[in-house]
Amino acid sequence: MTLKLSMRGETPPFRAMDVLADAARLQAAGADVVHMEVGEPALGAPRAALEALRAATAAGEKLGYTSGLGTAALRDAIAKLYQRRHGLDLDPGRVVVTAGSSAAFAMVFLALFEAGGRVGLADPGYPAYRNIMSALSLQAVRIATGPDTHFQPTPALIAAVEAEGGALDGLLVASPANPTGAMLDRAALSALIEDGRAARGGRGRVLIVDEIYHGLTWGLPAVSALELDDDVIVVNSFSKYWGMTGWRIGWMVVPEPLVRPMQNLAQNMFICAPHPSQVAAIGALSDAGEAEVVAELAAYRENRSAILATLTALGFRDVAPADGAFYAYATLPEGFDDSTTFCRRLLQEHHVAATPGLDFDPVRGGRTVRFSYAQSPERIIEGCRRLTAMVEALRGAA
C-alpha cells in the first residue's frame, strides 16, 4: 500500500531542532560545539523541583493519572504566582495545566477556531505557532513587523492585513517574543485588547498571549495580559524561566466558560500532563526554587551584553531589542546574503550552532539569524569569539 500524506501532515521542519541534531552529530565525532541554536537553559530544572519529586516518590506517592486540568495543588500554586508577580487575585479554577505549552496552543486553537479560521501572528515569530495552525487546518496570517513597530503587531498593521485578506478571528502575540525578545508595554498591549474588542463588527477578536518568557526581562518587568482583561487566553510554561524543557509541563489561564471545553480536550488528547512533572513544578514554584532561578539571571544579563556588543561590532543590522527572553535576532552584515549558508558554515567550520531566520520569518528570514544566549557566560563568550573570527576571516578573503 502506498501511503498518501494529508495536507495537514505536510508540516515544515523546525529548523532550530535540525541544527541541534547536526550539532549533536558533530559533538559525537568529538567537536566542541557552542550551542546558540535552541532556547534551552543550560542548568536545567531547579534543585527544589528535583527534591519535590524525590520526596514524593520516597513517600510512596502514586504518580498516575490526574485531572485533565492538573492537580489542585499545582493549579493553586500557579494562581499564587500571579499574586506575587502581578498582584492578581486569580481563581485557580481558571488554570489549566498542560503537557507543555505546545499542548496548550493546540488545545486553544481547537477550542476557539473552526477549520479555515484566520489567526494573525507576528513575523518574525515562533515557527511552531503557524505550523500547529497549519496542521489544524487554520490560516496563520502573517503580520510583518520590524524595528519601526518594536517587532510587535499594532492595530494599524492588523487593519492593513484585514483590509487585504479579510477579518481575523484571532490574534496571537508573545511578550517577550521569540526570536526578537521584544516586549509589549502596558499601552501597546492595551491598544491590542481594545482593538480586539471592537473588531468584527463588535463581535470581538480572540486574543491569545504567549507569556512563556515572563521573569526573563532585562528592563521593566513584563505586563501580563490578565492585568488588563479577563477575556484573554494566556499561555505559559516551566520550560524557560525554570529551565524544565524536557519535563513537558505548562499551563494556560482561560475565561471560566472555556474551562470545561479545555478539560474535555485534555482528557481525550493527552489524558493529563505528566504527574511527576506536576509534582516537580510545585517544587519549582517554591521560595527555594524561585531563589535558585533568580540567582541565574545575572548570567543571562552578562550573556545578553556580550552577544549584542558582538553583533553591533560586526555590523549586524536591525538588531532586535532583546527586552526579554534569551535571544538576539539580527540581519546579517553587508556582504552576507544567505543566513542558511552562514549558519551552516558557522557550525561546520567554527562549531557554533545558530538558527537561520527562515525558521521565524519565511519571507524575510533568508538574511537574518537568531542566537540563543541561554548557556553559561564562558560558553557565550567563546561563541562570540568564534563568530567574530568567522566574519573577519570571510571579510578578509573577499
Image (cartoon, rainbow, N blue to C red):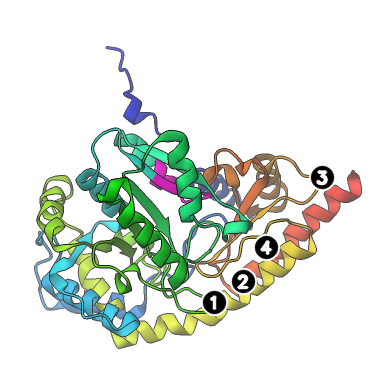
1 and 2 marks in contact (CB < 8 Å): yes
Helix, strand or loop for disc 2: helix
Work out which quarter of the rendered image holds the C terminus and state it.
top right
Residue type, mark 2 in image: Arg
Category of crowding for the residue at label 1, using alpha-carbon neighbours closer than 10 angstroms: few (below 14), some (14–19), many (at least 20): some
Disc marking residue 218: 1
Helix, strand or loop for disc 4: helix
Q: How far from the left and from the top, in percent, is residue 204?
A: 28, 52
Disc marking residue 335: 3
Q: How far from the left and from the top, in percent, is residue 336?
A: 77, 44
Residue ID for mark 4:
383
Q: Is residue 192 above or below residue 112?
A: below
Dot 3 or dot 4: first in sequence order is: 3
Residue ID for mark 2:
304
| Residue at 68% from the left image edge and 67% from the top image edge | 308
Question: In 3D space, how far apart are the residues under numbered discs 3 and 1 (Cα atoms)?
Answer: 32 Å
Q: How far from the left and from the top, in percent, is residue 358?
A: 57, 42
Question: In 3D space, how far apart are the residues under numbered discs 4 and 1 (Cα atoms)?
Answer: 21 Å
The boundaries of the magenta stretch are 120-130
